[in-house]
Image (spheres, rainbow, N blue to C red):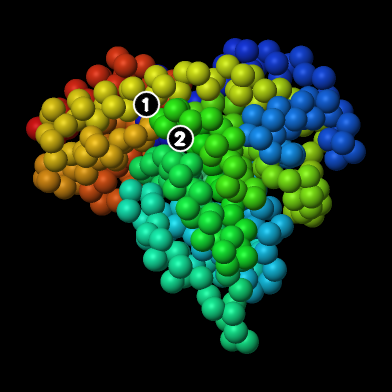
Amino acid sequence: MYKDFRSDTVTQPTQDMRQAMLEAEVGDDILGEDPTVRKLETMSAAMFGKEAAMLTVSGTMANQIAIMALTQLGDEVIVGEDTHIYNLEVGALAALSCVQARPIASTQGQFAVNDVKKAIRPKGVQSPVSRVLCLENTYDLNRGYPLSPEYQAEMAGIARDHGMSVYLDGARIFNAAEALQVDLPQLAKHADALQFCLTKGLAAPFGSMLLGSKEFVEKAKWIKQRIGGGMRQAGHMAAAGIVALTTMRQRLREDHENALRLARGLAAVDERLVDVNLVKTNVVQINFEPAGKDAVSVTEALLKEHIKIKLIGPYACRMITHWGITPEDVDCAVAAIAKALK
Ligand SMILES: *Cc1c(COP(=O)(O)O)cnc(C)c1O
């Protein structure tokens, strides 16, 4: 058995999820007749204080449906340069929505107010329309920075002043809520629409939820159908999601504690490997360059010890803690990395 730190997406479904999938009451969801999907959607919307929700196959699909729903041909969407929607969705903003991305830099996940203001186009016959401001929380899947409701409110204020919509990619929003100790509606309040993943820290085998107003979700359902995302007896999928939402949130604290344990352990080996202060949720980024090692050689050495970590650059790796990782696994990984650096 490998200790797999590459991502929280490698999590196996719990026994309760497997049982719930088996026993789920289902129907044809395209006809709106799956009671388990309805239940998951109602539950999700209520949790975040939104009017409506829709199950999608993936976070990528939810993100792209949202942008299709909120934009028109040739619009511009402002995105963080380290975000999933900009880097890891196969150019879908251009390919599916025919919009142009305007990436901006961040400092520990936060855009500077002036950078956002500068990125918003003046109206003019030659200008694309700045239509959507995309936030991501936690920000940067190789860092996992939680963004506060106050910061999100400030960003949304700027967008609103310019007639723009706000979309929130909350793939790991439960980690943000846990780290900041804030309620989910606080984090959702300033977004017109948001998605969260059931498949990250919550460990469900599939699915994301796209949330917003009734009108938005109605449009989103129609777009989902257009791109072949309509499902039939999807209640078997939704059943695992319900278990994920009801049983897996409380334990995210353990993942954050394990991430800190990992970062501190690595810093004790060599303080140049990690910046412990930047570890806020379940993500630890490691830089092997000061220790005179490249990331490929360390990754290969760890593999021999049955430990998997994710390569993110010539000298950088990422490790994520999750339901399948115990404090003992963390200590084991720290010892293996120390050995690999000798
Ligand atoms: C994982 C992730 C997604 C996409 O989710 P999939 O279900 O893998 O398509 C989107 N945004 C962020 C920030 C993610 O981490």
Residue 176, disc = 2
Q: Is residue 336 visible?
A: no
Image disc number at residue 256: 1
Q: Is mark 1 within 8 Å of ligand 1?
A: no
Tell me the quarter of the picture where residue 198 sits.
top right
Q: Is residue 252 above or below residue 23?
A: below
Residue sitting at x 59%, y 80%: 123
Q: Residue at x 33, y 22 (%)?
A: 257
Q: Amino acid at mark 2?
A: Ala
Picture disc at residue 9: none
Residue 188 relative to residue 229: left or right: left
Indicate the quadrant containing the C terminus: top left, top right, bottom left or bottom right: top left
Q: Does residue 183 appear in the picture of this structure?
A: yes
Spot occupied by residue 20 in the image (x, y as percentages of width and height): 70, 16
Relative depth, front residue between 121 and 32: 121
Q: Is residue 61 left or right of residue 232?
A: left
User: What is the C-alpha distance between the residues marked 2 and 1?
Assistant: 10 Å
Q: Please state if 277 lies on the left or on the right of 97 as rendered.
A: left
Disc 2 on helix, strand or loop?
helix
Q: Give left or right: position of 97 versus 312.
A: right
How far across and how far down the image is residue 148, in percent?
A: 44, 41
Q: What is the number of callouts on the image?
A: 2
| Residue occupying the point 54% across, 20% down | 248
Viewer-closest of 57 and 126: 126
- SS at badge 1: helix
Estimate the x, y position of residue 18 in percent, counting from the top left. 65, 17
